[in-house]
Amino acid sequence: MKATLYTIIALIAFAANSLLCRMALAEGYIDPWNFTIIRLLGGAICLAIIMSVHQRRLQQPNTPHQDTDVLKETILKDKGSWLSSLSLVIYALCFSLAYVALDTGTGALILFAAVQLTMIGWGIYQKEQVSTIQWVALFVAFAGFVYLMLPSAAVPSLIDAMIMAISGIAWGVYSIRGKACASPLRATGFNFIRSLVAIPLLFLIGINYLAGIRTEGVILASVSGAITSGVGYSLWYVAMPLLKSTQAAVVQFCVPVLAAIAGVLFLSEQLSLRFIIATIVILGAVSVFVLTKQTPKPSAHIETVR
């Protein structure tokens, strides 16, 4: 139940983030470089404040208990990693750059294909058990996703396609590294704080676009960074240790569906028969994949959950 709850909330945050990016970048309120800068800065500030409050609570005196003290010490030691921060920066920047260069359908197809290959490939490498039914469900979910996105897809330029693929791989790596974190909040917070090292480099290019930034773009980028990225990624890191890499990969097929629903509700976008059919196929296939249990063979490698 805990895994389901946090996963759903995180996926809603991802969909909201997609919507905010679409509103900010597609409408020309801000350029990709400054959007990324404000997004990373907003996430770092928001999570730094939350971490500060959380750390004060952990350090408050209470009834001594050895297990509790050990847990607190473990949590306070979790400060993310430079590799995770690098993955975060690469994902955020490449996604923004490719988003304005590619059609929505094309970008989504490339991004999610890269994410799936990265995370499912890692899961197979880690000898995660995937049943025949789950493989079928995976292909059905991907077929539904292609059916949903194909009408708005177009042949992309090689460079733009590679940038979006790199973004997907980086997000896959960032997600996988969340499986080992002791404190999702602190790991995400320090990952965002470390990412600020890249801001001076981004600003060298972003400074050329300052004149075109509108207030709406700054607000959308700030909300994207602080709420749907900062808080959303923290919740995703809560869910990741509770999911297999293959499960975490497949459930993300729900993000475009949730983003499309949000577009209908908040941007007055049209609800089509194609979307309804694709939604039923994707959600049904994802449910089958996640709920299917496979009994491992006696000789099979069983991975313990830490």
Image (cartoon, rainbow, N blue to C red):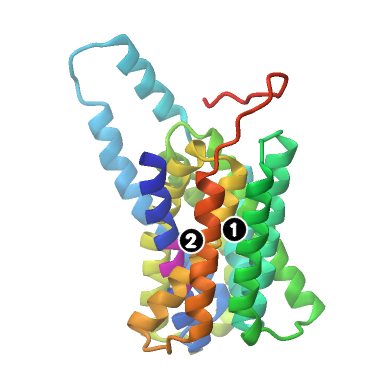
Whether residues under marks 2 and 1 lie with C-beta atoms below 8 angstroms apart, the answer is yes
Tell me which amino acid carries mark 1: Val
- Residue 197 visible in rendering: no
Residue 170 picture quarter:
bottom right
Single out the residue that lies furthest toward the right. 158
Q: Is residue 220 above or below residue 153?
A: above
Q: Which mark is residue 89?
A: 1
Q: Residues within 10 Å of mark 1 (few under 14, many from 20)?
A: many
Mark 1 lies on a secondary structure that is helix
The quarter of the image holding the N terminus is top left
Q: Is residue 223 above or below residue 207?
A: above
State the image coordinates of residue 289 (x, y, percent, origin top left).
Answer: 56, 50
What residue span does the magenta drawing correspond to?
13-18
- Disc 2 and disc 1: Cα gap in Å? 8 Å
Mark 2 lies on a secondary structure that is helix
Looking at the rendered structure, the number of numbered marks drawn on it comes to: 2
Identify residue for label 2.
40
Task: Judge by depth and name the residue closer to the eye, 128 or 65.
Answer: 128
Direction from residue 180 to residue 57 in the image, left or right: left
Task: Judge by depth and name the residue closer to the eye, 234 or 52.
Answer: 234
Tell me which amino acid carries mark 2: Leu
State the image coordinates of residue 74 (x, y, percent, origin top left).
Answer: 43, 24
Magenta stretch contains residue 17: yes
Task: Judge by depth and name the residue closer to the eye, 189 or 175.
Answer: 175
